[in-house]
Image (cartoon, rainbow, N blue to C red):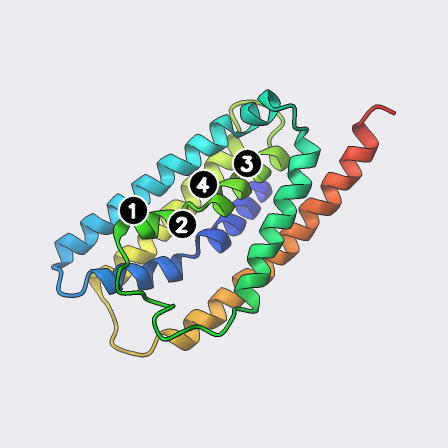
Amino acid sequence: MHDIVKTMITLLAVINPTICTVMLLSIDKGHTKKERLLDATKISLSVLAILLLSALIGRSVLQAFGISVEAFQIVGGVIIASIGFSMFSPKPASPNAETPPEDTISNIIMFAASPGTIATVVALSAAHDTSWPPVITLAGVLLAVAITWIVMLIAALAPSGGNKNGSQQVITRFLGLILISMGLQFVLTGIKQFFFISPS
């Protein structure tokens, strides 16, 4: 259960439900509540399908290319940490950077299930699951996407008129700090396992 919670928290940090919600509200201006709920559900189901597939076939892809789990865990840790750094110390945004006018449902899906998110899922599967199917990672994906869906539903049903920018930045930086820590942990664990398990 502890590993499932860690997996869920790490994926929530990468998916970033707060940003997904802001993007959803920006494209759903003028839409009815029913349309917002439908959009949130479409996004969540698409992200869920992509991440579940990544968790199921990720390790097989590594084996097909002759990449060790330890090596990918190290690379995945670096990717996770770099995402965390970008969230913790974001570059100054241009006026249109936060909610670009051309946001679409596809853009939100690509943001939530980005290559970084997919790499994180595979790295988590390599770190926490020793057999197939990767139950721990699958459970973490289900919980993380479910929470993201709930957050978007709440915002779609009861959008507030207040300024969300400050709280959004605080949450994003906190999640970035978690990602940096998790990425570093993956790197250190991968290095340890690589030198301990690999034949001399």
Q: Nearer the viewer, mark 1 or mark 4?
A: 1
Marks 3 and 1, Cα distance to the nearest angstrom? 21 Å
Q: Is residue 131 above or below residue 19?
A: above
Label ID, residue 141? 4
Q: Secondary structure at mark 4?
A: helix
Residue matched to label 2: 112
Structural crowding at the residue carrying mark 4, measured as other residues with C-alpha within 10 Å and reported as few (<14), some (14–19) or many (≥20): many
Q: Earlier in the sequence, mark 3 or mark 2?
A: 2
Circle 1: residue type: Ile
Q: SS of the residue at dot 2?
A: helix
Disc 3 residue type? Val
Q: Is residue 190 left or right of residue 12?
A: right
Q: Is residue 65 left or right of residue 189?
A: left
Label 1 Cα crowd, 10 Å radius (few <14 / some 14-19 / many 20+): many
Q: Residue at x 61, y 35 (%)?
A: 128
- SS type, badge 3: helix
Q: Nearer the viewer, mark 3 or mark 4?
A: 3
Q: Earlier in the sequence, mark 4 or mark 2?
A: 2
- Residue that label 1 marks: 43
- Work out whether mark 3 precedes mark 4 in sequence or the reverse, and give the earlier one: 3
Q: Earlier in the sequence, mark 1 or mark 4?
A: 1
Distance CA(mark 1)–CA(mark 2)? 9 Å
Q: Which residue is painted at 13% across and 65% down in the image?
A: 30
- Disc 1 to disc 4, C-alpha distance: 14 Å
Q: Amino acid at mark 2?
A: Ala
Would you name the residue on which mark 3 appears? 122
